[in-house]
Amino acid sequence: MASGGISQRVGQEIVGEAKIARMPPDAAAVHDDRLARSAGLRGGFIVNEYHFAQITQMFLEYFGPNWFTHGEIEVRYIAPLLDGDTFIPKARVIGEEPPGSGRLVLELWCENQHGERVAIGRASCLAPEASSPQ
Amino acid sequence: METTAREVAIRAIEEHFARLRVGESSHQEHIYTEEEVRRYASRYDIPYPSVYVSAQGELLVPPGMIFLRPAATFGITAPDAPPQARLGIYTRAHRWYFKPARVGQKVLFDGEIFDLYERRGFYYLAVRWEAREEDATLLARGEEWHTLGFVRKVASPG
């Protein structure tokens, strides 16, 4: 399976578009700044669907349609993303598993404007050149 | 006043948590309309339809929309419940995609609780789900970890 091209991808870093995260006007109570602070949290934070939307967009642009049929993603939310924070999804190709399968494995993380990680995880997908019927 | 609100919320969470059972399940059906999908794209600032079009020209549902909401399904949702006890905080998600869902098609969700636990003052539920077409073709599956509410139980002094 085009292993030459796949091996060249190992070590590649993917950077999604940096965006300013905004709180949807109809967000649930947990995202309300006053209520969240009263519960001892740092503030109302951006819904996780925002993270997923941006991460998915990054992977769809990298993997193409294979993401719809072979994408796998695991995300842990480790720090709040607050209204007005910058959100930047990033990933690095760390290998092919199993070897020769054409499936790339990636380390995944998302940063705010301070370079702090707000989410971390792992993803895998069939490489773009390892075509698959949709 | 804040302490009272916290205590009321904790009590509601603990009562709800005590009623939940591993293996408790839910079946849901959903049709993703074009209006709903475009609202999602606008809300979360992603281009649409952009890459969300099949080779046959059909509009596709962004994969991030396809999941079973743990807290909305098994958590506290009653509008008269303490706001700090409703829904909760997403802590982790693991999802696999097998076939894109088309805008307008019916998607069938089956989910069940596979773990319930308390850690560092938060009550957690973990839910496993599958999303299928009407002919049972698997579209996606996932595992989601979520707190019940967003208020932490504080350990008693001493």
Image: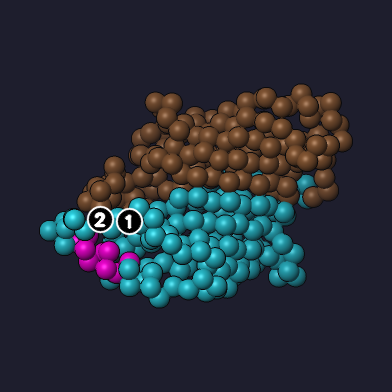
Chain colours: A brown, B cyan
For disc 2, the marked residue is B154
- The chain under label 2 reads B
Pointer 1 with pointer 2, Cβ within 8 A: yes
N-terminal label among 1 and 2: 1
Q: Residue at x 56, y 69 (%)?
A: B112
| Residue B55 spot, x, y in % from top left | 78, 47
- The chain under label 1 reads B
Q: Quadrant of the N terminus of chain B?
A: bottom left
* Number of the label disc, if any, that sits on residue B121: 1
**Residue A111 placement, left or right of A85:** right
The reply to whether residue A36 is in sight is yes
| Residue A50 spot, x, y in % from top left | 48, 44
Q: For the residue labelled by badge 2, is the local secondary structure a helix, a strand or a loop?
A: loop
Q: Which residues are magenta?
A: B5-13
Relative to residue A72, is residue A109 depicted above or below?
above
| Residue A114 spot, x, y in % from top left | 39, 26
* Quarter of the image where one finds residue B138: bottom right
